[in-house]
Image (tube, grey):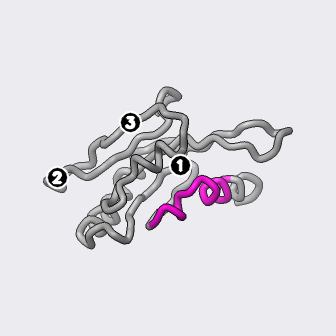
Amino acid sequence: MGKKHKFVIYKINDSKTEIIVDKISSDESYDAFLEALPEDDSRYAVYDFQYEISSTEGKRSKIIFFTWSPETASVRSKMIYASSKDALRRALNGVSTDIQGTDFSDVAFESVLERVSRGAGSH
């Protein structure tokens, strides 16, 4: 991903044969990322998540892999994304955290921050 992109969203193409890039953004706003996730269809996403544990430790960055599969997505969509996830996940280097989201509360900034900062000291 390099440092030039903030997030990349992937989708499975219409013929269900390959995973393709749906959207690439360098927008620093986490809300822009959330707005790019469809309310009623599944997606994968990789996000360069920056956060601060304390003022003395400074900013940290973690690459997060999201599997977005909202309740409102079709059963077929959820099944295809669930079965294809490992292939994409294995192809991505540098990912430190996996997050499964079924609604926006699962992928809210605070929820993600809690997951990554909890993993920072232990794990």
Q: State the residue at coordinates (54%, 35%).
A: 28
Q: State the residue at coordinates (27%, 44%).
A: 20
Give the Cα distance between marks 3 and 1: 15 Å
The amino acid sitting under disc 2 is Asp
* Dot 3 or dot 2, earlier in sequence: 2
Return the x and y of residue 92 as percentages of the image width and height.
Answer: 43, 44
* Element assignment for label 3: strand
Extreme-left residue of the structure: 15
Which region shows up in magenta? Answer: 103-116
Label 1: how many Cα within 10 Å (few below 14, some 14–19, many 20+): many
Residue 14 numbered mark, or none: 2
* Element assignment for label 1: strand
* Dot 3 or dot 1, earlier in sequence: 3
* Dot 2 or dot 1, earlier in sequence: 2
Q: Which residue is mark 3?
A: 24
Q: Is residue 56 left or right of residue 59?
A: right
